[in-house]
Image: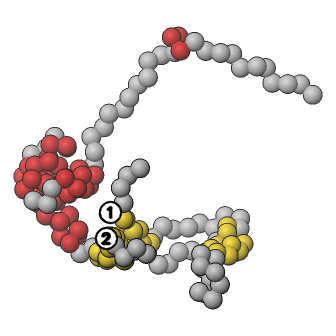
Amino acid sequence: MKRAPAKKTVDPKTLPPIRIKKCPPTIEEAILAAQGLTDDLDHQAYIAAGFMDVSVDEVRPLVAKAAAEAASRETRVVASRNGAERAVVVERARPRTIIPTGTARPAIKLEPRSRPTGAVVVERTRPRIQLTPRVRTFDLTRQPA
């Protein structure tokens, strides 16, 4: 059996310079970043326009629309085990279309409370097409590591 030839070591000085692709954020990303920085709609429009290099008048109606959508999000307060409250934002996302490939994927089933807490059973089942919208939750009080 033949072995593959050993890789040659490359001197980093002989490599071409690294090219960095710079592209402006999308309008949704700019508005989301502005919403994270301030609650005032005029300031949000000014910040998002600065990110996108467009006029404030072009961004203002989009900021108002995004603010209305943000107000419709559900916010729930969940009490943790030590009694402190933490805010959780529930955001509904469009469901993804899953194309079955014929391979089995593990499905997770949570058992009732009669078993020890945290019992998880993993079964091999056929992949299913998701018909319900996905829900993402964000813990706003968690400190970054």
Q: Which mark is residue 117?
A: none
Q: Which residue is mark 2?
A: 87
Please provide percent x and percent y for residue 44: 13, 54
**Image position of 109 (left or right of 67):** right
Q: Are marks 2 and 1 in contact (CB under 8 Å)?
A: yes
Q: Secondary structure at mark 1?
A: loop
Look at the picture and state if 41 lies above or below 8: below
Amino acid type of the residue that numbered disc 1 sits on in the rendered structure: Thr
Residue drawn at x 24%, y 52% as measured from the top left: 33
Q: Badge 2: how crowded within 10 Å, few (<14), some, or many (20+)? A: some
**Image position of 76 (left or right of 125):** left
The quarter holding residue 106 reads bottom right
Please provide percent x and percent y for residue 113: 59, 86
Please provide percent x and percent y for residue 45: 12, 53
Residue at the extreme front: 82
In the rendered image, the quadrant that contains the N terminus is top right
Residue drawn at x 59%, y 66% as measured from the top left: 99
**Image position of 120 (left or right of 79):** right
Q: Is 34 or 145 nearer to us in this picture?
A: 145
Any part of residue 94 in sight: no
Q: Which residue is mark 1?
A: 141
Residue drawn at x 10%, y 49% as measured from the top left: 46
